[in-house]
Amino acid sequence: MYICMCNAVTDHDIRRAAADGVHTFAELQARTGCSDCCGCCEQEARATLDKAVEQVLLQLPVVTA
């Protein structure tokens, strides 16, 4: 699912970034460009990143629906 339409960032991109060591929203923005245009996606992007980081830290597999 697209989270950031302006920069074509998907939830998968955010989960992959978290798996690669991204832990903050600023790091996510630098890596993907997510939410650096209109900002409408920031809340969803932050929530997706927080959940992904939690799963990485707990070393749980990411389950997609």
Image (cartoon, rainbow, N blue to C red):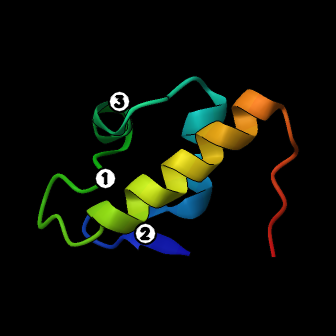
Residue occupying the point 30% across, 68% down = 41
Residue in view at x 49 percent, y 28 percent = 22
Q: Residues within 10 Å of mark 1 (few under 14, many from 20)?
A: many
Q: Which residue is mark 3?
A: 27
In this rendered view, identify the residue nearer to me: 5 or 40.
40
* Number of the label disc, if any, that sits on residue 34: 1
Q: Is residue 30 visible?
A: yes
Q: Amino acid at mark 1?
A: Cys
- Asked if residue 14 can be seen in this view, the reply is no
> Closer to the N terminus: mark 1 or mark 3?
3
Q: Which is nearer the N-term, disc 1 or disc 2?
A: 2
Instruction: Identify the image quadrant of the N terminus.
Output: bottom right
> Where 51 sits versus 55, above or below?
below
Q: Is residue 15 left or right of residue 50?
A: right
Q: Nearer the viewer, residue 53 or 35?
A: 53
Disc 3 + disc 2, Cβ < 8 Å: no
Amino acid type at mark 2:
Ile
User: Distance of mark 3 from mark 2, alpha carbons?
Assistant: 16 Å
Tag 3 secondary structure? helix
Mark 1 vs 3: CB contact within 8 A: no
The residue pinned by badge 2 equals 3
- The 10 Å Cα crowd at callout 2, few under 14, some 14 to 19, many 20 or more, is many
